[in-house]
Image (spheres, helix red, strand yellow):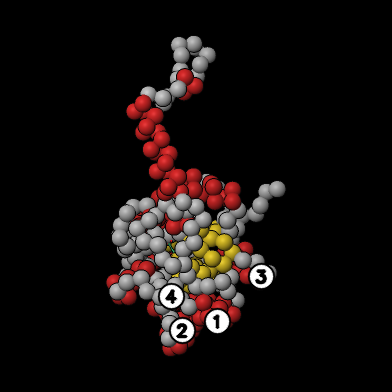
Amino acid sequence: MSRAQKTPLSLVRMKGKGRKIAMLTAYDYPTAQILGEADVDAILVGDTLGMVVLGHETTLPVTVDDVIRAAASVRRARPQALVIGDLPFLSYTVSVSEAVRNAGRMVKEAGVGAVKLEGGRAMLPVVRALVRASIPVMGHLGLTPQSILRFGGYKVQAKNPRAANRLIEAAKALEEAGCFAVVLEAIPADVAARVTEALSIPTIGIGAGPDCDGQVLVTHDMLGIYDDFTPKFVKRYAELRETMREAFAAYIKEVKDGTFPGPEHCYDSDPKDK
Ligand code: KIV
């Protein structure tokens, strides 16, 4: 049975029907193909690309071109999932017009169905301008990794009542400005539940407890590939780093002892052997 292409509106409707939204990250064609086969609802081409693929210590060095190239490869897998391009550090905060231009490039050059940006009230003019330009926007509140220098580390946010109320008000303002969903990262579960209750657009949690309308994890974390830093909220569904290390070691051994390549991997002079 062919499934329908997911859109921002599909995710909003899922919340209305009480159906949970599953989102994961991807930065390349084969991963996006496999996520499509697994029927994920949304694929985030996150700026975590900078850490889990490019090996930077933070997401700050990621460029718009990095995300566009990755998102274009994800789109070439033609997943039915909604593909969301993450706006990297400084690509939407210098000016509203630059934000529209950079988000527009993600739509035009990579074919994303939406963009994501980090931040609360200060981002409202940007969100409004993007929505006016017909670019759907996902918000991101709580631990926003592009603010790592200001936060002084990856710390749980909204832990006191004042900060929690501020976050809830910011989420409501993002909805009013036109966001179709909001990521909530590393906040207490009860605060995330209050945000989820207060909004009619879906909340997508990462380290925000079970009451969000959906969940997102970084694929390289949940597959056990990325090992530099594993937050408490990550559940590992596989240990692919181990599997890959074993495969590499087996190949190296067989090359060294001459058992690879075997006859089944070799061509002969028969013209029919292709
Ligand atoms: O860049 C990313 O992958 C993200 C997720 C952690 C939500 O923003």
* Kind of residue at disc 2: Ala
If you read the primary sequence from the N terminus, does the residue marked by circle 4 or circle 2 appear first? 4
If you read the primary sequence from the N terminus, does the residue marked by circle 3 or circle 4 appear first? 3
* Kind of residue at disc 3: Gly
Q: Which residue is mark 1?
A: 194
Task: Indicate whether 83 appears above or below 124.
Answer: above
In the rendered image, the residue lying farthest to the bottom is 162
What separation in Å lies between label 1 and label 4 (alpha carbons)?
A: 13 Å
Helix, strand or loop status at disc 2: helix
Q: Which residue is mark 4?
A: 142
Would you say the residues marked 2 and 1 are in contact, meaning their CB atoms lie under 8 Å apart?
Answer: yes
Q: Which residue is mark 3?
A: 18
* Kind of residue at disc 1: Arg
Helix, strand or loop status at disc 1: helix
- Relative side of 8 to 144, left or right: right
* Kind of residue at disc 4: Gly
What separation in Å lies between label 3 and label 2 (alpha carbons)?
A: 24 Å
Residue 157 position by quadrant: bottom left
Task: Indicate whether 159 appears above or below 225.
Answer: below
If you read the primary sequence from the N terminus, does the residue marked by circle 1 or circle 4 appear first? 4
Q: Which residue is mark 2?
A: 164
Viewer-proximal residue among 27 and 133: 27
If you read the primary sequence from the N terminus, does the residue marked by circle 1 or circle 3 appear first? 3
- The spot of residue 90 in percent (x, y) is 33, 66
